[in-house]
Amino acid sequence: MSSTVRNLLVELLVEELPPRSLQKLGDSFAQGLAASLQVQNLIEDGAPVVAFATPRRLAAHFGRVAPRSPDTSTPLRLMPSSIGLDTAAQATPALRKKLSDLGVDAADMPASHLRIMSDGKTEMLYLDRLIPGIPLAAGLQKALDAALAGLPIARTMTYQLADGWSSVDFVRPAHGLVALHGRDVVPVRALGLSAGRETQGHRFEARVSPIVLRDADSYADQLESEGRVIPGFAARRNEIVRQLDAVSAAPGSSPVRDAALLDEVTGLVELPNVLTGKFDDAFLDIPRECLILTMKTNQKYFPLLDAEGRLQPRFLIVSNIRPADPAEVVSGNERVLRARLADARFFFDHDRKKPLDAWRAGLDKVVYHNRLGTQAERVARIAAIAHAIAVELGDEELAAQARVAANLSKADLLTGMVGEFPELQGIMGRYYAWHDGQPDEIAYAIEDHYRPRFAGDALPRGPVGTCVALADKLETLVGMFGIGRIPTGDKDPYALRRHALGIGRILMEKGLRISLETLLGMARTAFAGAVPLDDAACTRLPDFIHERISGLLREQGYSFQQVDAVLASRPGLLNDIRARLEAVRAFTALPEAQSLAAANKRVGNILKKAGDEADATLTVDLLQQPAEHALQDTLNRIAPTVDHLIDLGEFNDALRQLAALREPVDAFFDQVMVNVPDPVLRANRLALLVRLQREMNRVADISRLAT
C-alpha cells in the first residue's frame, strides 16, 4: 500500500434501497465513516467528504486520508516519585516491577521517558508510552463496521451468503464492496464481502460491466461515462428538475412542485429521463385533488398545470431508461394511469349515489377509542363544542351552520374514495357537500376543520370552519388528556402537540376574542355525563397549550425572556399576544426597564415570603412615610390611563406609563421598611406592594425581564 496521503473511496453495492430513505442512508453512511476516521486520526481536519447514493449503492469519497495514523505519546500514571525513585534518583524495585508488568525493561528505557508531575497533592511518576498508529486497513474496518451499524434502518432483512451457510442482516442484500486508497485496494470486509475495485453500472444502460475503477478519484466520472449512472443524489435531483422544467416549459405549463415526490423519484432512478404522457380529458371531471394524488402517490408522476393553475390532461414520467424510441415506455405508463383514474372515477361516482349525511350513519359502528366511544359519539361532541363557540363568537346563524358542518365533518371517512386515499379526508367531504347542495361556508368548513395540519399550514378560511376546527382539536385534547393519554418524550401518537399548536395559531392569527379557559370549559361540558375524565390531567391542558405557543413564538424571533414575560401571567385572551410581545420588546429598550424589572422581581419575592399576610386590603390612612404616599399617588395617577390604553389594545403606550414608577419605587425601597414589627402596618405595606405588582404586570410579568 502507498505510504502517502491519498483520497479514499468506499462503495457498498446493494439491491434496490428504500427510495424515501435513500438520501438519509447515503448521508449517514458517509458521515459515519468520516466520524470514525477522524477519531482515529486517519483523515485530516477539514478534509472534504462527498456522499453518493443511488438506488443500488451507498458510497463516500474522502480527501486526504493517511495510510496510517500518526504515533502518539501518552503519559501513564505509575506511582508516587518517593516510592518509585531512591535518593540517587534511580528506579526502586517497586518501579522496576511495575515497568516489568507493563512490558518495559527499566534497564533499557531512556530516563527521558519518565516524568515527575504533581497531581495537586503528591509528586507522581508518569511513563511516556508510545502508542503506534493504526493502519488504514484496520481503521477503515472499524469505521465501516460502525457506519453500517449506525445506519437509520427501520427494518432489516436476513439473507444467505454465497457459501450457502452463513447469513447476515441488512436493509437489502449486498453484492459488492469497493475500498480504494488512491489506486490501492484497502483489504476490508463487510456483510460477507471482501473489498475490491469492481462495481456495476446501470442495470440496462451501462456501457461497461463490470466497471473496474482506476482509483478513488475516478469513481464519479467512470460511473457516469461507463456505467451511465449519476451517483450523486443532489446531482441526480438537479438533473430531474432541469428536465422537468425543460419538458414542460415549451407548452407553457409547469409541473406540480412536490419536494417529497422529487426526493422519492430521485431515489428510484439512476439515469433520469423525463417523458410526457397524456390521459383522457373526460377524467378532468374528477376532483383535481384525486387525480393529482393518484398520479403522485401510486405512479410517482408529476402532474402538469397550465398558466392559470388548472390541471392539464398531461403528466411527466421520470423513467430510468433512455430508449431510442420512448413511445412504448410512454404508452405503458398511460395504460397504467388510465386504469388508476378509472378506479378513481368509480369511487367518485359510487360515493355520490347517496348524500353525505347518509354516510354519517355508519359512524356509530366505527370505534374512535375504547374509552371515548365511537366516531358518531365523537362527532356529537364536536358539534356541541362548535355550536357553543359559534354562539360566543357570532350569532345563531353561525351557530346553526357550525353544527351542520361539524355533524358532516367525519362522514367522508366511510366513503370509497377516502378509504382508497386517506389523505383526501375533508377534501372529499367538501366535494360531496357541494354535490348535496350545501353552501360554500359548510363545504369549506368540512375540509378546513383539519387545519392547520402541519407547521405553516393555512388556517380555516371562514368563521364556520374556524369554529369546527377549534372544536375538533379541543375535543381531541380534552378527551385524550382526560383518559390519561398525555404525550411523553417524543411519543405523541394522537398528535396532541399539533392540535394544541393549531388552537394557539387560530386564536392568535384569527384575532378571536374568546379565552382559552372558556374554550376548555365548553369541551369539558361536551363530555359531561358520558365519559368520566381525570380532572387533574385536564388541569394540565392550559400549560400544555401555552408551552406549544411559547415554542412557536420563539421560532418567530421573540426572545425567551419576552415570551416568558407575556405568557407567565397566563393571559385570558391569546389574540393580542403578539401586540403584547411587541410592547415588551419596546419596553426593554427604555432606560427605566431594568430598574423596574428588578424592583418587580423584588416585590414578587417579598410577597411570596409573606404568604397569606399579603392578602390584606390597602388602607390609605395607614400610609405613614412620604415615600408610601408618593408611590400610592403615582399608582392612582397612572392606573386609569393604563386601564384605558389596555382596553384600546395600546400595550406599548401602557407599558411606557410604568416609567413614571421608577423614582417612587426606588424611593420606597430606600426609605420604607416593609417587614416592620407592627402586623397591621406590615400588612398594609404588603397590600401596597400587591397593588404595585398588579399594575406593573397588566401587560406582562416584567419581573421575567430582569437580568
Image (tube, rainbow, N blue to C red):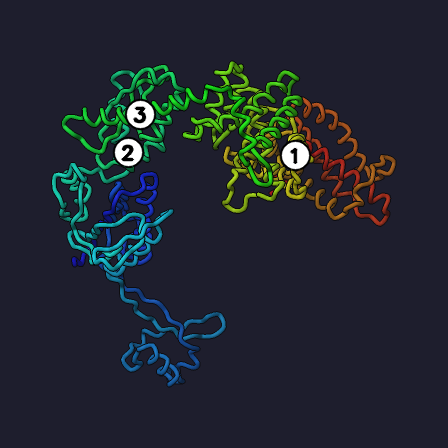
Residue at 71%, 35% (x, y): give it: 663
Is residue 459 left or right of 70 when viewed as pictured? right
Q: Quadrant of residue 621?
A: top right
Image location (x, y in percent) of residue 206: 15, 39
For badge 3, the amino acid type reads Ala
Judging by the rendered image, the residue that carries numbered circle 1 is 527
Judging by the rendered image, the residue that carries numbered circle 2 is 237
Taking 338 as reference, is 528 above or below it? below
Using the image as rendered, state which of residue 289 and residue 560 is in the foreground.
289
Secondary element at image label 1: helix
Farthest residue to the left: give it: 208
Q: Residues within 10 Å of mark 3 (few under 14, many from 20)?
A: few
Taking 104 as reference, is 345 above or below it? above
Q: Which mark is residue 339?
A: 3
- Quadrant that contains the N terminus: bottom left
Q: How many marks?
A: 3
Point out the frontmost of discs 3 and 1.
3
Nearer-N-terminus badge (3/1): 3
Image location (x, y in percent) of residue 633: 79, 31
Image location (x, y in percent) of residue 128: 34, 71
| Mark 3–mark 1 distance (CA, rounded to whole Å) | 46 Å
Point out the frontmost of discs 3 and 2.
3
Residue at 63%, 16% (x, y): give it: 397
Using the image as rendered, state which of residue 676 and residue 430 is in the foreground.
430
Q: Quadrant of residue 314?
A: top left
Secondary element at image label 2: helix
Q: Residues within 10 Å of mark 2 (few under 14, many from 20)?
A: some
Secondary element at image label 3: helix
Residue at 79%, 43% (x, y): give it: 614
Image location (x, y in percent) of residue 300: 31, 30
For badge 1, the amino acid type reads Phe
